[in-house]
Image: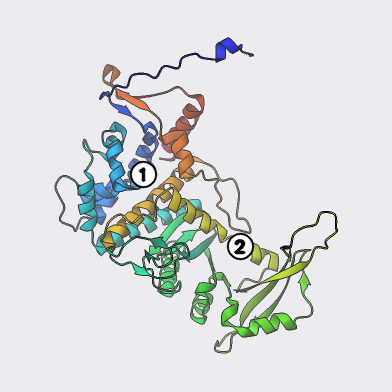
Amino acid sequence: MKSSKVEIVSREHKIPEIRFEDRRLTSFAGLVVFQGLFKELTIKQKLQNCFSHLKVSPIFGHHLIALCLIVHLLLGYRKLRDMDYYRDDPMVKRLLGVTRLPDVSTVSRALARVDQDSVEKVRQMCRRWVLERLVRTGFSRLTLDFDGVVFSTQGRGREGTAVGFNRKKKGARSYYPLFCTIAQTGQVFDVHHRPGNVHDSNGAKEFVLQCIERIREVLPYVTLEVRMDGAFFSDEMVGLLDGMGVEFTLSVPFERFVELKSLIEQRQRWRRQDETWSYFDSQWKPKKWRTRYRFLFIRQRYKEIYREPIQLDLFIPQTYGYQYTVIVTNKMIGMRKVLRFHHGRGGQEKVFGELKSQSQMDYIAVRRLSGNQLYLMTAILAHNLTRELQMRTESRVRGTTERRNPVWHFEQLTTLRHHILQRAGRFARPKGKLTLTITNNPALRRDLLHFLDALKQAA
């Protein structure tokens, strides 16, 4: 129906008077969705088991602090001091099961008292949740991506940090944890915490072995695949994966093997895939290796950038060049599928980007190493819980692709905050029944009821 200008335009410009009252108003009414998920996962009880060996305050236990940090990150806050801005929110209190939120100093002291046993138990809980999800989905093939991420900090007062490779902040002290992510679900399976002055491969062999063994204990029938970059390339790593029957692709660093350059230069015939890609493969090994593996030599044709001033009235011929890539693999499929599978590692970088920008994974909260490790785990749990919520309420949109993209279409946590979580509401008890009143927005009503109904059906 067409409307007139008088019906649309408003002449009200006066700034209203501001009044602050305690009327049981919440700014995060959409958290009611996570309340149902937390209850289904019994997250509070499981966190309590992780800290049961610690001597805690009778008021705020470490499990409440960890749960408070998870909610803190779900809401989009970063620093601990930001808790002051939602301290009186009744929806946050109800989700945590408390009548008063802990002070910032209480949270800092609790993080300082956390020990390595507690962090290890939280890691076990995270792995258990991911494995339970993988059992329910029934995948016949799982893809594990391994890579490290740099967390920079300022000053020398952070325990466990060291000066190492840092592309953005050279000379800064940092952590350099190693992550294992599941490509099909976009979840973080496990993390191995390290200081910033170690190589990518430091502790990687033991970590990769543990991740594979833990998945096979629960899912022995699943075919496992592993993707890594050139920093992990070694005889030990390739032999470990091949010996365990794991399908893998690893980038091969040119600078470590001079023979690769001569093999490519002496090659006369390349198998043409299309106008851009051509390749050849060879059963090759470096001199000190014992076993030969399939090395895939790939050539990509590209347009060279013309760096001189462009004269529009003249015709300048376009010159072409080649970029070369070498991948070692035990997969016996064609070059195109191997290359697309290996390039699917870019999905892990997207997960890292979401963890840093939306779950504040790179924030260094306290001085103690164990406290920072726990904060990192709460960021991972917040990310995994967001994915778990969507997997419980949405249907798969695709099967297994060549790049091993997630089989669900996941909304980012920022989108969920804007659409659902950050919504005003009011608690009331008409006729003794607890009621949360939210604005009657059609899009919000549709999405919120969809999540609540789907969680009830999945329970």
Q: Earlier in the sequence, mark 1 or mark 2?
A: 1
Q: Nearer the viewer, residue 185 or 420?
A: 420
Above or below, comparing residue 82 to residue 53 in the picture? above
Q: Amino acid at mark 1?
A: Tyr
Q: Which mark is residue 77?
A: 1
Q: Nearer the viewer, residue 87 or 392?
A: 87
Residue 66: give x, y in percent of width and height.
28, 50
Above or below, comparing residue 22 to residue 96 in the picture? above
Residue 318 seen in the figure: yes
Q: Answer yes or no: do the residues labelled 1 and 2 have beta carbons within 8 Å? A: no
Residue 17: give x, y in percent of width and height.
33, 19
Label 2 environment density (alpha carbons within 10 Å; few <14, some 14–19, many ≥20): some
Q: Is residue 59 left or right of residue 449?
A: left
The quadrant the N terminus occupies is top right
The quadrant the C terminus occupies is top left
**Which residue does the numbered mark 2 point to in the structure image?**
343
Residue 391: give x, y in percent of width and height.
48, 45
Residue 211: give x, y in percent of width and height.
43, 66
Q: Quadrant of residue 279?
A: bottom right
Q: Which residue shows up at 49% across the image and 13% down it? A: 11
Above or below, comparing residue 229 to residue 416 in the picture? below
Secondary element at tag 2 = helix
Q: Is residue 94 left or right of residue 233?
A: left
Q: Amino acid at mark 2?
A: His
Label 1 environment density (alpha carbons within 10 Å; few <14, some 14–19, many ≥20): some
Q: Is residue 310 left or right of residue 90?
A: right
Q: Quadrant of residue 92?
A: top left
The Cα–Cα distance between marks 1 and 2, rounded to whole angstroms, is 33 Å
